[in-house]
Amino acid sequence: MKIYHAPETQQPGPQDMFTILMIFAIAAVTMHWTGQIREHPYGYYLSAMRHLGRIPHTAGKQGVQNLLLVARFGIYHHVGTSLWELARQCMRACIEMEFHLPLIIPSRSPDLDKQHNQRIFWECYQLDRYSSTTLGRPFAIADHDIEVDLPSSTGLDTPDSLISVSTFATSSDLSVFIYSVQLRQITSRIRSKLLSMSSNSHDHHRSFMATGEIYTSLHKFLAELDHWRASAPRYEQPSCLYESQEWYDFLLEKDKLFLMRGGVNILFKSRRGVSQDIMRLWGRCATRVVELYASLYRAGRITYTRSYFQMLFHAGLSVIFCVSSEAKSRTGAGRLIPDFDATLSVCGNVLDSISEKMPDARGYAVVFESMRKSVFNNFSASPTTTAHPATPRETNTTLLAFPEMNMPIQQEHHPIMPISTQGQGQHQTSGATQAPVYSQWMPEMDWTNMDFDAMQGMEAGLSEYVWGDLNINADMWNRIEHMIDDTIDDGQ
């Protein structure tokens, strides 16, 4: 408003120009994807960067907010640095300004400056928790060192006395933001507990109790996540994706998958058996993540990001591992995840679609399709499953084909924190399930004997790609992609 209402003789300063251009860049991501505007969001970002160098003071509260805007845009596009490093820099500044501590002078009514500081801190907290958890790196601050409260759910300019008691939340409050922070607090506790159990997994004096502790912790956190979902804010007329119940269901299953993956990792590494119930629950969470994201993506309600790509790849890899592990232990496959072939086809379709828009992700999509095809050829003909022949697509096809979801999506991140409204454009599809856009000359590569260490290595390399870190392991994906391409060329 300062820019639009400024007198003609007064030029906006670099800080104002940077802020509004970054807002344009972030808002343009979904609008450009749905075809509502022609301008690419990266153009706004580059223009904003030219003004950033002219800002005299880049530290303090304003400096943190500038970094948060860059990090938010970095969720969608490369910004030349690691988001984890940006998160740590933001949190370090917050700690130096003591935003993690309560104000010494108490106040009966919410102080505007206090509320502003709280919002900045908890936004930095979300970015730190999400990036650190994804990369398996230390948190910038421990939960027990945080003493500041969550911000008030009312707006900065809304007195408590004017808030009416209602079953439904309002679009002007902070219910969604607080709800998102509460989820990050739960996942922070989950990660801390998983690390604790992992460090004790080789303690022979506790080995007879360790398995029971792991199973108890898994069920405890599953119940805590379900309780979080039950307390979701409800909007009579949701104005964006972040106010919808489908979004909350997606977040729930995504973090349940993170929990189950961590628990299974400890059980495998400690050479303890993993029960069929745990494997089934793990596979079910992975399947639901694929279904929920695919439904939102198909409807044009959610955009594509590197973190979403990683999440889908991880979910598909979990399904593949569950199926192959089951096949090794018994005759046939498909009891744990009856419709695994349909789930993997949907996952492959979405990964393929995203890789068309993010060319640097193509190598990962090619590898996943090779794994999907290997599992399909080895296990889909089993009498315990329903075989669906894979149908190669035209390489220039841009439309997706999705099956009807087997599990109904109930009315229901992340990026990390809802800021802008997602577009509501429709991505129309029809027809039967089809294999992603790779040639029928895809070479036969047996991925069915992939062990747990190999699975972890693939996940680690993808995590580094997602969060903008340089890692020599990423070269593995390029070499696999070139090997597949060479084999295709030889076959033709």
Image (cartoon, grey):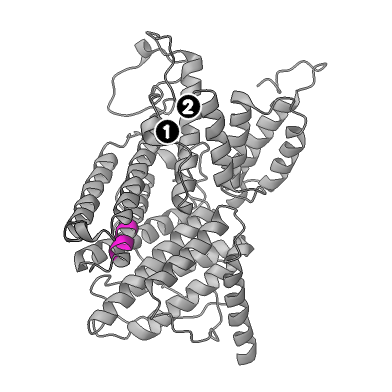
Q: Amino acid at mark 1?
A: Phe
On residue 423, which mark appears? none
Q: Is residue 95 above or below residue 445?
A: above
Label 2 SS:
helix
Number of marks drawn: 2
Instruction: State which region is magenta.
Output: 262-267
Residue at coordinates 37% horizontally, 43% vertically from top-left? 188
Instruction: Give how far across and how far down residue 222 sits, in percent.
Output: 25, 49
The residue where tag 2 is placed is: 119
Instruction: Give how far across and how far down residue 3 sits, in percent.
Output: 71, 23
Q: Amino acid at mark 2?
A: Arg
Image quadrant in which you'd find residue 330 = bottom left
User: Can residue 150 be seen at all in this image of the molecule?
Assistant: yes
Q: Pick whichever, 325 or 432, lies toward us.
A: 325
The residue where tag 1 is placed is: 177
Q: Nearer the viewer, mark 2 or mark 1?
A: 2
